[in-house]
Structure formats: structure tokens, C-alpha cells
Image (spheres, rainbow, N blue to C red):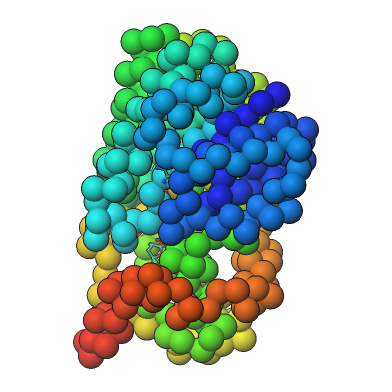
Amino acid sequence: MRALVTGGCGFIGSHVVRSLIASGWAVTNLDCLTYASNPGNLADVAGNPRYTFVHGDICDFDLARNLVDKADVVLNFAAETHVDRSLLDPLVFVRTDVEGVVSLLEAVRHAPQARLVHMSTDEVFGSLPLGIEAAEDAPFAPTSPYSASKAAAELQIRAYAATYGLPITVLRCSNVYGPGQHLEKFIPLFTTRALAGEELPLYGDGRQEREWLFVEDLLSAVGVVLADLPVAPGAHAVHIGSGERLPNIEVAGRICDLAGASRSLIRPVFDRPGHDRRYALDCANLRARGWAPRVPFDEGLSRTVRWYADQAATWSHSADNDFAAYLDRQYSARLSAVEEFGS
Ligand code: NAD
Ligand code: TDX
């Protein structure tokens, strides 16, 4: 089987590429190598005869069409993914996360053999009250430019599925973590800063809840989905979450403990505007297909912190000028403010 994986040099995409290659697939990875990519993530498969890398943009329709024509399955992981950056620079999110998806939809429309599997997020539902889990048919209520773009892409997918009779799979995933995630995200940022003895900028009161899924459990879910792709026209949503929902302040504390750092490094700072309090996915349908997460959060977090500790030579924050500038823009004022934001 031939897969076109987009965004394969990013965090999740690189794990998916490696896993597909290991399962015997031929994989073409289309990635335009934004700041979030790390081609080094795939150093171990780069020489594999079943692996091809194409440096290009999913918004380039001619390129997308050419590659989709040669694929049995198209897995779209290419995206702008960081909520904080979507608050600073929303336009690029609309371009990649909406226009890029329409470009792939157009390509798939002209390639009847190719099945599209698109990666979406639990964030399309916005913040959920305690006790509520979002089922696959729950209404969208996105609150950030990132989540609004992901929801908009899903609406385009629904429209294409209905208009052109395409069977499309939409994966909606909770927060994924594990080795190889960009340092800007919560767990890598707090881990690397804790290892370096730096303050950990916890937004607001730190009581926001996220549902943490270890990346290996996402891979097994993708395997279940690929083994039984739908044939009926429609947008078929699949929820993938661990059920392990924790407040950020608790996760920050556990990271400190695993990194051998003092919890006093945790520093409540000015909140993320529009910050969603709680996400929770109802994953009963995927579980009914035989899938279950296998890596408990404590084990996954411990493995992740160890991985970043082992990689310390490669992630010096100040060595990457663009990332240093981003950290300065995002955190300097927050960390130098004298007010107490936690309570
Ligand atoms: P990431 O930011 O680590 O990687 C994104 C990759 O896409 C990068 O390699 C980047 O170069 C590439 N890319 C960006 N724009 C592109 C374009 N226009 N054309 C081609 N390539 C492009 O992302 P991730 O965390 O691995 O997330 C992958 C997908 O999963 C995204 O759709 C994201 O919305 C979704 N998702 C992520 C999480 C999570 O916790 N990481 C949770 C739910 C859903
Ligand atoms: O410095 C920080 N301080 C902090 O308190 C950062 C970076 C984050 N946080 C909080 C915000 C969130 O409540 O930690 C939580 C997790 O933050 P992120 O890692 O930025 O993830 P989130 O906003 O939940 O979005 C992630 O999960 C869903 C991914 O980035 C998305 O791509 C995915 O769709």
C-alpha cells in the first residue's frame, strides 16, 4: 500500500511515517519544513527504499494532485499547530489549516483510489463543562484562530463528502505528547526549562484540564482506523483520547519531580487570551473497535522527560534565534510582571 503523509517531518507525522514504513507501506512525505519541522526525526528511515521525501506545500494544488494520484491513502498531518502562535499570527493558520485542506480535497476529488484521513482536534468543540464528554456529533464551538481553522477545515470536508460522495475519515485527537514534539508545546517547554532550572510559565490559575495521549497510543489508533477505512460517502469522525484528564498545574508538578527540579520553579503568569478550561472526548466508538490506550500518563511522561534529558545537547533554546525571539515575545513580559496571577 502507498501512503502520502503530509507534515511527516513534524511531531505526530514523523511517528506515523516511521510506523507505516515498519508495517511495510511505501510512504511519500510531503512537508514544506516550517519552523515546527525536524527532518532529523526521520533520520532512521531516510535511506529506506520505501520512503520518499518531497519538499513542498499542501497548498500547492498541482503538486498535491500529482502526489495524491499515486497514493492509496492520504494522511494529512500538515498544519500550523500552536494555539499561542495563532493568537500572534492567525493568517498562516487559515492558509495551511483551511486552504491546504481544500487543496488536498480537490486533489482527492480527482483521484478516486485515494482515501483521505485528516487529522483534526478536540479543540473544535471549545471548552466543555465538567462531566461532559464530546461525542463525534457534538456541535463545534472553537475559540482560538487555530481551533476555528481546524473546525473550518472540517466543514469543508463535510461539504466535499456530501457534494462529491467522498468517504473521508476525520481523526479528532486529544493532546498528544511524547518524544520529538516541538519545544514550544507545554510538556516539552516545561520539561526542558525544568531540566535547565528555568521558571515554568503556567498560564492563569493552571486549573485548565487537558486529556493526555502518549504518541504510541495514537499510532495504534491510526492502525485500527487504516485497517478498516469507511467506503460509504461522508465525513467519518473518530475520537482518540486517553481519558486521562489532568489540570496543567498537576502536570507541571510531575514534570518538576521527574526532572529533579523544585516545584517552586512553577510561575503563574498572565493567562492565554480565550484559554479553554477543559477538553474531553468520548472515545466509546473507537474502543468498541478494539482500541485502548496502553501507556498510562505517568509512564509516558517519565519516558518523555527522559528522552528530552537524553537529547539535551540538541535543544538549547538560545541556539535557535527564531525560537529565542518567539520565547521573548511570548514570555518575557509575562515572566517579568510582578503581579501574582495564580490563586
Ligand atoms: P507539528 O507542528 O509538530 O508539525 C506540523 C508539520 O507540518 C511540520 O513538519 C510542518 O513543516 C508541516 N507543515 C506545516 N505547514 C505545511 C504546509 N503548508 N505544507 C506542508 N507541510 C506543512 O504538528 P503536530 O503536533 O505533529 O500535529 C499534527 C496534526 O495533528 C495537526 O493537524 C494538528 O492540528 C493535529 N493535532 C495535534 C495534537 C497535538 O497534541 N500535537 C492534538 C490534536 C491534533
Ligand atoms: O507556556 C505555556 N503555559 C501553559 O500554561 C504553554 C505553552 C501552555 N500552557 C497551557 C495551555 C494549555 O492549557 O498548557 C496547556 C497545553 O498547551 P499547549 O501545549 O499549547 O496545547 P493546547 O493549547 O492544548 O493544544 C494542543 O493540543 C491540541 C496542540 O498544540 C494542538 O495542536 C492540538 O490540536
Q: Quadrant of residue 339?
A: bottom left
Q: Quadrant of residue 74?
A: top right
Q: Position of residue 276 (x, y in %)?
A: 31, 55
Q: Position of residue 89 (x, y in %)?
A: 25, 56
Q: Quadrant of residue 186?
A: bottom left
| Quarter the C terminus occupies | bottom left
Above or below, 22 against 304 in this view is above
Above or below, 143 against 35 in this view is above
| Quarter the N terminus occupies | top right
Q: Is residue 220 left or right of residue 163?
A: right
Above or below, 296 against 237 in this view is below
Q: How many labels were placed on the picture?
A: 0
Q: Is residue 228 left or right of residue 193?
A: right
Q: Nearer the viewer, residue 207 or 240?
A: 240
Please give the name of the residue rendered at 34% of the width and 70% of the height, measured from the top-left corner: 326
Task: Report if residue 231 is visible in the image.
Answer: yes
Task: Report if residue 124 is visible in the image.
Answer: no
Q: Nearer the viewer, residue 104 or 242?
A: 104
Please give the name of the residue rendered at 48% of the width and 78% of the height, measured from the top-left corner: 319
Image-quarter location of ligand 2: bottom left
Q: Is residue 244 left or right of residue 124?
A: right
Q: Position of residue 105 (x, y in %)?
A: 40, 23
Above or below, 28 against 300 in this view is above
Please give the name of the residue rendered at 63% of the width and 56% of the height, measured from the top-left corner: 41
Q: Position of residue 242 (x, y in %)?
A: 57, 49
Please give the name of the residue rendered at 62% of the width and 79% of the height, measured from the top-left corner: 313
